[in-house]
Image (spheres, rainbow, N blue to C red):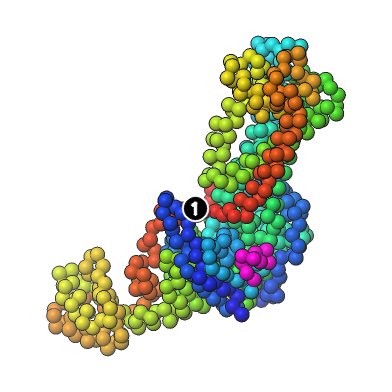
């Protein structure tokens, strides 16, 4: 190593004119560099492929084939009813990757490296959430294809269908920022994993994702009707034309699910983007 | 103009319900083109100092300038001219060596093409050409360190911060890395490095700041520091531990400081003013008292002695439970 260095230095390979970093930072270019890096990571770790591709296929097949015959939904079939629920659950779990990713990068000291570079302060978070959105989109496409194979159909036309997909991804993107902030506050990435399961599983199961809320016992039913996951699933379900004739609750989020999801997503972004960026500019490996 | 200048930096953390003064009025000045070593045990505040100077954390009070730029109000400009390598190799496991460096270059806004070319140059420079296109996951600790150090040199920084650059490395990699750092500073870069290894500070730094409990407790060249605690030391090795008392008494009479005795009672040391003549006199008295010796000699004080004299404790013997574990040398 030393001899090689000496050789290079002899030929003035390291001119000490003190080359500095470029003069401008640019949020799009910095964020793209981080997105590129995160996407490479997805490409090289099989865990992510399993999560993004195999798990959605498994969920669609399990739920539609196992419960398909035993759960009845008025005016439609269970496979149609189910798909929006699976989409909702999968994109929510996908968003937790942003928290895991930030916690892992912080632990590895990579955030410290980034923070000593002349980057835009929002670039790392933007690159993180953008890469996770890309992974979530891949999951969505896989689930849609699997769903179509097992007999799921959307009935409100292609625009409404695309609107439903966009709404699911928007909500998940906004939730990514919440998770990214949490990821910078926990001590280890494992905390994110465990907490996600502890919180998201009850949240998706006490909702209308897999069963009809009106079949739940009283207190659970009230919870399910006000659960943001229910609003998300309800919104997607109505845009896919998969609601059937099941009675709709009087609860506000159930009557205006699309508006609720839009407002909720915008609020999440408005609150958590600034919080996460501020946190980022003060965070460092301990 | 000093390239690095810190004045009365203070930073207090709250840990386990107690206030920890990580920096307690730390001040230092590094002239251009010099290599300064911050020497101190774990928890002395070295890393906190580097984090303040590299804009990673804000001090509670005090000011600092790097290359004439205020680290608090001109953080963005500071980041453009410094390179830094942290205590832990901060490399992305899933990227290859080249990709890691390309990423850093792109984030310095060198442009994708220039960043890629620079990455290749550095990979060659650090003798990683063969492994450069493999994911870092399979790299040894020493190779990761080299990638991290290369990351600090993607620009040709005016000021280079190296936080414990050789912690966790085997002796051979450490010596190789010292060679790299020396070659780099030969070009006129100003370097601030932290270390717990006295030998390393002695070897690399033009001048040393000894840090303990968030403060500078001594400053000077290695020789100046050694001179501060007396010229020479006389060291004896006794044949029989029964003679310890007698030998200690004789040394105490000739010494300028306390006599230290090791656990076995057979090794004794004392600082003295004039080495050779004092040794001769002491040897004569020891012979008269019938103390048998395996070995006797004079030695120059090491930085270990400096540290012991200045702080009352050894540099290494300070296990800090809060300090994160060292890098795993084995490739994982």
Q: Chain of mark 1?
A: B
Left or right of A24 in this view: A2 = left
Q: Where the N terminus of chain B falls, by quadrant?
A: bottom right
> Residue placed at 58% from the left, 50% from the top?
A106
Q: Position of residue A249 (x, y in %)?
A: 69, 18
> In the rendered structure, does residue B76 fall within the stretch colored magenta?
yes
Q: Position of residue A172 (x, y in %)?
A: 70, 36
> Residue placed at 55% from the left, 76% from the top?
B30
Marker count (numbered)? 1
Hey, which quadrant is residue B83 in on the image? bottom right
In the displayed orientation, state which residue is furthest to the bottom.
B277
> In the rendered structure, does residue B110 fall within the stretch colored magenta?
no
Q: Nearer the viewer, residue A240 or A279?
A: A279
Is the residue marked by circle 1 packed among few (<14), some (14-19), or many (20+) residues within 10 Å? few
Left or right of B15 in this view: A208 = right
Q: Position of residue B242 (x, y in %)?
A: 15, 69
Residue A16 appears in the rendering: yes
Left or right of A176 in this view: B60 = left
> Residue placed at 63% from the left, 73% from the top?
B67
In the displayed orientation, state which residue is furthest to the left.
B289
Q: Relative to B305, is A215 above or below? A: above
Q: Position of residue B320 (x, y in %)?
A: 41, 57
Residue A37 appears in the rendering: no
Q: Relative to B245, is B42 above or below? A: above
| Secondary element at tag 1 | loop
Hey, which quadrant is residue A138 in on the image? top right
Hey, which quadrant is residue B210 in on the image? bottom left
Q: Where does the magenta region start and end? A: B69-77
> Residue placed at 38% from the left, 71% from the top?
B307
* Residue pointed to by mark 1: B328
């Amino acid at each position: 190593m030393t001899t090689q260095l000496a050789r290079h230095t002899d030929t003035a390979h390291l001119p000490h004119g003190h080359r500095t970093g470029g003069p401008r930072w640019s949020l799009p270019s910095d964020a793209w560099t981080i997105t590129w890096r995160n996407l490479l990571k997805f490409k090289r770790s099989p865990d992510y492929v399993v999560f993004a591709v195999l798990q959605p296929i498994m969920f669609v097949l399990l739920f539609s084939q196992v419960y398909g015959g035993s759960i009845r939904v008025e005016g439609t079939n269970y496979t149609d009813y189910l798909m929006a629920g699976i989409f909702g659950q999968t994109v929510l779990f996908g968003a937790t990757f942003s928290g895991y990713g930030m916690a892992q990068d912080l632990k590895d000291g990579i955030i410290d490296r980034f923070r000593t570079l002349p980057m835009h302060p929002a670039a790392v978070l933007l690159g993180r959430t953008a890469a996770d959105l890309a992974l979530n989109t891949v999951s969505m496409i896989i689930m849609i294809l699997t769903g179509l194979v097992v007999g799921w159909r959307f009935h409100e036309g292609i625009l409404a269908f695309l609107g439903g997909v966009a709404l699911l991804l928007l909500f998940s993107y906004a939730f990514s920022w919440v998770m990214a902030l949490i990821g910078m506050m926990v001590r280890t990435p494992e905390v994110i994993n465990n907490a996600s399961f502890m919180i998201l599983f009850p949240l998706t199961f006490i909702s209308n994702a897999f069963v009809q809320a009106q079949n739940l016992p009283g207190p659970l039913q009230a919870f399910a009707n006000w659960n943001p996951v229910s609003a998300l699933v309800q919104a997607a379900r109505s845009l896919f034309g998969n609601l059937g004739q099941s009675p709709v609750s009087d609860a506000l989020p159930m009557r205006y699910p699309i508006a609720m999801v839009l407002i909720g997503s915008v609020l999440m972004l408005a609150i958590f983007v600034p919080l996460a960026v501020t946190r980022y500019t003060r965070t460092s490996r301990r | 103009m000093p390239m690095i200048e810190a004045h009365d930096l203070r930073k207090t953390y709250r840990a386990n319900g107690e206030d920890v003064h990580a920096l307690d009025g730390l001040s230092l000045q590094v002239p251009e083109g010099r290599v300064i070593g911050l020497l101190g045990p774990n928890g002395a505040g070295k890393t906190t100092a580097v984090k303040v100077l590299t804009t990673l954390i804000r001090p509670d009070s005090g000011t600092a300038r790097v290359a004439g730029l205020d680290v608090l109000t001109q953080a963005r400009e500071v980041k453009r001219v410094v390179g830094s390598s942290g205590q832990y190799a901060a490399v992305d496991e899933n990227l290859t060596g080249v990709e890691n460096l390309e990423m850093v270059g792109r984030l310095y806004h060198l442009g994708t093409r220039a960043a890629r070319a620079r990455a290749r140059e550095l990979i060659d420079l650090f003798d990683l050409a063969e492994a450069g296109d493999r994911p870092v996951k399979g790299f040894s600790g020493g190779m990761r360190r080299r990638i991290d150090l290369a990351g600090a040199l993607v620009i040709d920084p005016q000021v280079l911060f190296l936080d414990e650059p050789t912690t966790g490395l085997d002796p051979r990699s450490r010596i190789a890395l010292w060679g790299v750092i020396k070659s780099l500073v030969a070009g006129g870069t100003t370097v601030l490095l932290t270390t717990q290894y006295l030998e390393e500070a002695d070897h690399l730094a033009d001048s040393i700041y000894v840090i303990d409990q968030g403060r500078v407790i001594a400053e000077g060249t290695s020789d100046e520091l050694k001179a501060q605690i007396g010229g020479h030391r006389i060291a004896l090795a006794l044949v029989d531990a029964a003679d310890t008392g007698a030998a200690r008494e004789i040394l105490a009479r000739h010494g300028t400081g306390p006599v230290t005795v090791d656990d076995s009672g057979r090794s004794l040391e004392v600082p003295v003013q004039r080495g050779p003549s004092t040794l001769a006199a002491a040897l004569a008295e020891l012979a008269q008292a019938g103390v048998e010796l395996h070995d006797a000699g004079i030695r120059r004080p090491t930085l270990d002695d400096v540290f012991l004299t200045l702080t009352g404790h050894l540099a290494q013997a300070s296990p800090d439970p809060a300090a994160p574990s060292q890098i795993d040398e084995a490739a994982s």
